[in-house]
Image (cartoon, rainbow, N blue to C red):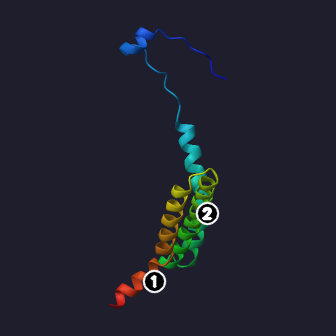
Amino acid sequence: MRKTETINFKNFMNGDWKKPKVNTEIKILTASSAGAVILVPNAVFAASVDGTFGNVHSAIMNMFDSGVVLVIIFAGAAWGLGHRTKAIEILIGVCIGYILARHAVDIRDFLKSI
């Protein structure tokens, strides 16, 4: 529980009062641990097969799929709250980005064949 501290306004405006340092190591560790837990199964799967580009690409695309779903949910919420034009703009952007990301390997192969 935090203790309430009163400071002098004049000292605050002059810069004489210094904000106490907050230990952010725990927050950073927690955020990086959550990311590691999400990435570990995909990274292990990608490394165990052959470590080829296809396996890494599929692991990355699995994470990207989750992000796309979250953005679509956000666009639906925006639409429901009355921001229809912004929701349509978000949906068009995420759909085009998703199509490009999903077909990146096909586009690369097509450009190689030219």
**Disc 2 to disc 1: CB gap under 8 Å:** no
- Above or below, comparing residue 84 to residue 51 in the picture: above
Residue 16: image quadrant is top left
Q: Horizontal placement of 108 versus 76: left or right?
A: left
Using the image as rendered, state which of residue 104 and residue 31 is in the foreground: 104
Which amino acid does the dot numbered 2 rest on? Val
Mark carried by residue 69? 2
Question: Residue at 51% of width from left, 79% of height from top?
Answer: 54
Secondary structure of the residue carrying numbered label 1: helix
Question: Residue at 54% of width from left, 64% of height from top?
Answer: 91
Residue 77: image quadrant is bottom right
- How many numbered dots are placed on residues in this image? 2
Please state the horizontal and vertical placement of residue 103, each as a whole percent of the image: 48, 79
Which residue bears the numbered disc 1? Answer: 106
Residue 71: image quadrant is bottom right
Please state the horizontal and vertical placement of residue 22, each as a whole percent of the image: 52, 28
- Above or below, comparing residue 95 to residue 52 in the picture: above
Q: Where's the C terminus, which quadrant?
A: bottom left
Q: Which of pointers 2 and 1 indicates the residue nearer the eye?
A: 2
Q: Horizontal placement of 87 versus 107: left or right?
A: right
Please state the horizontal and vertical placement of residue 76, each as a whole percent of the image: 62, 58
Using the image as rendered, state which of residue 100 and residue 78 is in the foreground: 78
Disc 2: CA contacts within 10 A as few (<14), some (14-19) or many (>=20):
few
What is the C-alpha distance between the residues marked 2 and 1? 23 Å
Q: Residue furthest right?
A: 1
Q: Where's the N terminus, which quadrant?
A: top right
Using the image as rendered, state which of residue 5 and residue 51 is in the foreground: 5
Secondary structure of the residue carrying numbered label 2: helix
